[in-house]
Amino acid sequence: MTTAWSRREALKLLTSAAGIAVLDACQSPAPSASGAPAPTAVAGAPSTSSSAASAPAATDQPRSGGILRQGNLGDLPTLDGNFLNGQSTIYPVWDRLVELDPQLNPVGILAESWDVDDKYTRIALHLHKGVQWHTGRELTAEDVVWNIKRVSSDPKVAGGGFFNWMSQTLSGVDTADKYTVVLHAERSWPAVFDTLSLLSIIDPATFEASGATMPTGTGPFIFGEYVQGDHFTLKKNPNYWQSGKPYLDGIEIKIFTDPQSMVTQLEAGAIDLILAPPIRDVARLFSSNPNFGVTFHQYSGGANLIFVQSKDGAGPTTNKLFRQALNAAIDRKRWTDAVLVGYGATKTLPLAPPNPGYDAARDQAQSFDLDKAKSLLQQSGVGNPPLEVIWNSTSADYATVMQIYQQDLAKIGLNLTLKATEPVAFVDQTYNSKFPSIACGATLYGNMRPGFFAGNVYYSPYSNWSSFRSDQLVQLTDGLLHETDATKQKQIYADWLNYIQDESWAMPWSNTAPRFAFASKVHGVRWNLADYMMTNDAWLSA
């Protein structure tokens, strides 16, 4: 059941020190598990929902039928399910092997149980039997092996993510029988389930025949139609392996380029659910109107940040002192207040609870200091070079904060050109490290284990969007990936945080406050720990 919270209660929750509840992280060896996943509640944790919409009564049962009409900002760069793009649109076409609960424990999805040795070097995954692809063929261990081999061998599949996690840890993958997949690692891999929780399992047969044009999985919804720049449609999977689900007959996803138009359509009743509405509309409408509600992600690992171009020959942003000057010129409080209007908190770290490396005091340590920025700029010796910043044009929030940044940089003699960039072009510019000097973005998965940053597109030492490289970063990240001793982990986490803050190639400034807004008839939509909006269990009241 979704609990309705007043605006005051929601603000109290979301403006806490980290913007989310602090949980004790569990670093014990992964237990065997079975059963289909369900939302996991934490004892004593408040609801993630700030909503004036009426929640269904405790006696209400999910109702089958109906089409959920969803609004989404921006188009997808690809329909490839193995590609990490941060989009929740066609996510329910596929299932994952596991997901994580708020204590970072794995919960089975396609994998009904698993066996892990005490060093995390052999992981055996036992699949549910009888799961069918949308084509009617049965899912087997060989299909999962194909997916794992693909993402561990192709650095372009996930913008550096899966390739880096897998290639630095995985030494082999094979099958023990038709329904058992065995992963082998030469060294300890404590974040293996964090990685597997993100891997959508796609149908190898369909992909090899049609490429990414026909997304096919085992998920609760079947891909129907895609009209570029306009809409997606998903249809109910009548043979879904979780009995009785999904409840919906389908999902229609309208693509918007203007967030205000998307909000207007929700208010008019033309759509039922929108992802990432502007915060000011949350404050204006959804906190007081009984016909609508909004749900924030309580355990999000997201952080807004700016990142700079660091590849050889890129100019002033390759200079550490210059990057530190840019960092000192970020007015985090003003930026956060301007766009999150009390629904978020400032940050200087890409980590968040329940990540065991999270340090709340350090997260608030960076101060806005233009005198320091000016001094660092002079020490850098690069002069006053012109700069350009790009961001996804669908994000009005980034436009707002970059205008503030432009004004503050001008005070220390730097001219910043602002360039809103169409979503697909923005993906190309960032994924391929083509942008000239500065870009805006949002890092995900900071709530997972620190080893996950080996594949993070902003912080990976092997392939990141800034093209930042250093032997020291490789060494520190190696410790994040493989160390299992708790005392040694603590020191490694501190050393890594010291390094990334000192080098300042990626600079967080606030949490992201992930949110979706909905009409009062919508129920069962939730967030997973990977910051994806889950419509698998959605249903519509009459």
Image (spheres, rainbow, N blue to C red):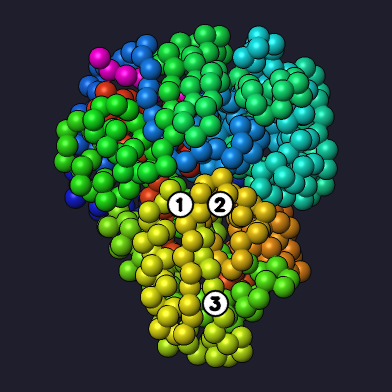
Q: Are marks 1 and 3 in contact (CB under 8 Å)?
A: no
| Mark closer to the chain start, 1 or 3 | 3
The answer to whether 265 is drawn above or below residue 414 in the figure is above
Q: Is residue 7 visible?
A: yes
Residue 346: x %, y % from top left: 38, 64
| Mark closer to the chain start, 1 or 2 | 1
Residue 88: x %, y % from top left: 49, 35
In the rendered view of the protein, which quadrant contains the C terminus?
top left
Residue 232: x %, y % from top left: 49, 26
Q: Residues within 10 Å of mark 2 (few under 14, many from 20)?
A: many
Q: Nearer the viewer, residue 348 or 360?
A: 348
Query: Looking at the picture, which amino acid does disc 1 mark?
Result: Ser
Q: Are marks 1 and 2 in contact (CB under 8 Å)?
A: yes
Q: How many marks?
A: 3
Tell me the distance, in whole angstroms, between the alpha carbons under discs 1 and 2. Answer: 8 Å
Q: In percent of the image, x 65 and y 12: which residue is there?
A: 135
In the picture of the structure, the residue carrying the numbered disc 2 is: 426
The answer to whether 344 is drawn above or below residue 260 in the figure is below
